[in-house]
Amino acid sequence: MEIVYKKLTEKELDTVIKMRIDQLTEEYTSEGRTVPEDVDLNAALLEFYKKNMAAGTYVSWLAIDKDADDKIIGTSGMSFAEKPPYFTCPSGKLGILSSMYTDPDYRRLGIATELLDRVLKEAKVVTSNGIIAGNNLKDIIGKTFKKDMPDYSYHIIVACFFVIT
């Protein structure tokens, strides 16, 4: 299997939107919740991706299986925001990690880790203290970012859950 990685473009949006809805559905059902039938996210996701990619406030990397007719098998994403500066983030700049998803047939192959590395490098962000829901980002992927990456002025908020089965 030959896996290649590339940045998201508008050409892949239909597939990425389907994968995002698959991810959200999997998260909902794994928590015992029922997916709302009256919510159609397609148009809202298309608008979000187009607007934020054009503005430079969203970046995403994709994993593609070249041996399976260029099937997109994994996604990653980071949105950028600013809020009033605070002691642990004096720049006020935030990177919000989302859309980390790997096709169930391709899990446990290091694809999500590679996607995360690429989106972090693309975003030029790093944190050693960004904690959400008790999870330190460096513990999630087993790396110490202070050692492995340069120090940038963004903090990361983990706004997703890695779905691993």
Image (cartoon, grey):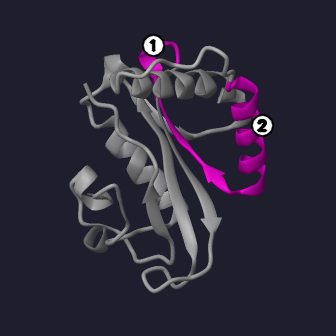
Q: Do the residues labelled 2 and 1 touch (CB within 8 Å)?
A: no
Q: What element carries label 1?
A: helix
Please name the residue that numbered disc 1 is placed on. 68
> Residue 142: x, y in percent?
21, 54
Q: Please report the bounds of the magenta region as a residue range.
A: 41-70
> Which quadrant does the C terminus fall into?
top left
Q: Where is residue 150 in the image (x, y as percent from the top left)?
A: 39, 75
Q: Which mark is residue 47?
A: 2
Up-down relation of residue 9 to residue 116 (above or below): above
Residue type marked 1: Ala
Assign the N terminus to one quadrant of the image.
top left
Residue displayed at 48% across by 79% down: 89
Which residue is found at the position 41% from the left and 77% from the top? Answer: 151
Residue 163 position, x and y percent, is 34, 32
Please indicate whether residue 7 sits to the left or right of residue 88 in the image.
right
| Residue 116 seen in the figure | yes
* Alpha carbon separation for disc pair 2 and 1: 29 Å
